Amino acid sequence: MNQSLKTFREGFQNLLLNFLWRQWSAMGVAGQASGEDVWIVDPEALLLLTCTLGRYDPRLFDEVLDWLQENGRFINIMRLKRILRTEKFAGERALAAIAAYLSKGAEALKWKLLTESVQSSSPPVEEFFISTDGKPLPSLGGTEPHFGRYGFRRGPPRLRGYSQRFRPTETANLALQLRALVGVNTRCEIVLYLLTHEAAHPSQIAHEAYYFERAIQAALVDMSQSGVVQLRSARREKYYWLLQKRWAALLNRPETFPQWITWPPLFSALERIWLKLNDPKLATLDPLLQSSELRQLMIQVRPALERARFDKKLSDDRQYLGETYLPVFMSDVMNLLK
């Protein structure tokens, strides 16, 4: 692999893993101190990205498992499945292994919903954890059976029990705070969206929150009858909104709510970029063919970045011919992470 591209891959990996640590730490995972992010964490999208990237950091992955044992009841399984059906993520088998591991006690039925959609019959066996240079890490202490069922060889997790309950008034935890207050359901996601937007049409909420429009529409009709969710019409369209200041007081938060980001398509795009950079075949190509492969990749992920409203961070690749696109690609990807 081109040396500059190899160095970039290593830096990209470090930034992604640091980002995952920061987001999970904000929700209560024991580890690195969380930053003062101004956006809302999306637990389902974050879990999907961690199913792929977390394999390169065993400590992060098992701390997330620990967090899920303490806080997993706040994960919206139906929304998680909806995101999986809509966006491309490579970690579905790892997600099924996590769900199988968590399928016990009062939460058993909830997690089993995730295991049913993944075939577990005689998958090829591979080491679950991978070193930062892409080599498999040998498992120690035998094979954990739930992961083995899905073709992964890893030792039994040694969960430390250090994960905490999420801090409800931390900026990033608005989604979790609302789920704790009103439940893990459609109405909670509607309130979350309306608190972070001036007003919204049902189709807009459904599209960006990953729900069926009919379910959002029906819930909004009922919620508007409460006198809390407000309604206005414009050009035959109905837009719903909330008195955000009153909700801020109720939730013990500043009057300015954190930023909404449509994380699933952005995470899907970042994962696909990561997987391409880790493809051994890419390393065997000369810089001209590498540039061509990466150009095609960015063309493929652009629709996802458009859905996340991050496409403005991309350059016009038509202005850069041949291998001159390589530094442009690296610059564009770093701009996404900023």
Image (spheres, grey):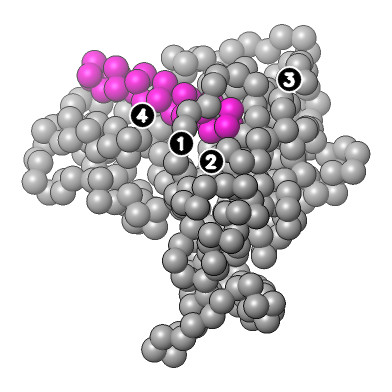
Measured along the vertical axis of the image, is residue 259 above or below residue 19? below
**For residue 231, which quarter of the picture?**
bottom right
Mark 2 vs 3: CB contact within 8 A: no
Measured along the vertical axis of the image, is residue 228 above or below residue 129? below
Q: Is residue 295 rendered to the left or right of residue 215?
A: left
Q: CA distance from mark 1 to mark 4?
A: 27 Å
Q: Where is mark 2, residue-wise?
A: 171
Measured along the vertical axis of the image, is residue 44 above or below residue 233? above
Q: Where is mark 4, residue-wise?
A: 277
Q: Quadrant of the C terminus?
A: top left
Q: Where is mark 3, residue-wise?
A: 162
Give the residue furthest to the bottom: 236
Q: CA distance from mark 1 to mark 3?
A: 23 Å
Give neighbour class at mark 3: few <14, some 14-19, many 20+ (Cα, 10 Å).
Answer: some
Q: CA distance from mark 2 to mark 4?
A: 33 Å
Query: Over which residues does the magenta segment extend?
Result: 1-26
Q: Nearer the viewer, mark 4 or mark 3?
A: 3
- Count the labels in the image: 4
Secondary element type, mark 3:
loop
At label 1, the amino acid type is Asp
| Sequence-first tag of 1 and 3 | 1
Q: Nearer the viewer, mark 2 or mark 3?
A: 2
At label 4, the amino acid type is Leu
- Residue under the image location 48 percent in, 71 percent down: 200
- Residue under the image location 49 percent in, 57 percent down: 196
Secondary element type, mark 1:
loop
Residue 37: mark in rendering: 1
| Sequence-first tag of 2 and 1 | 1
At label 2, the amino acid type is Thr
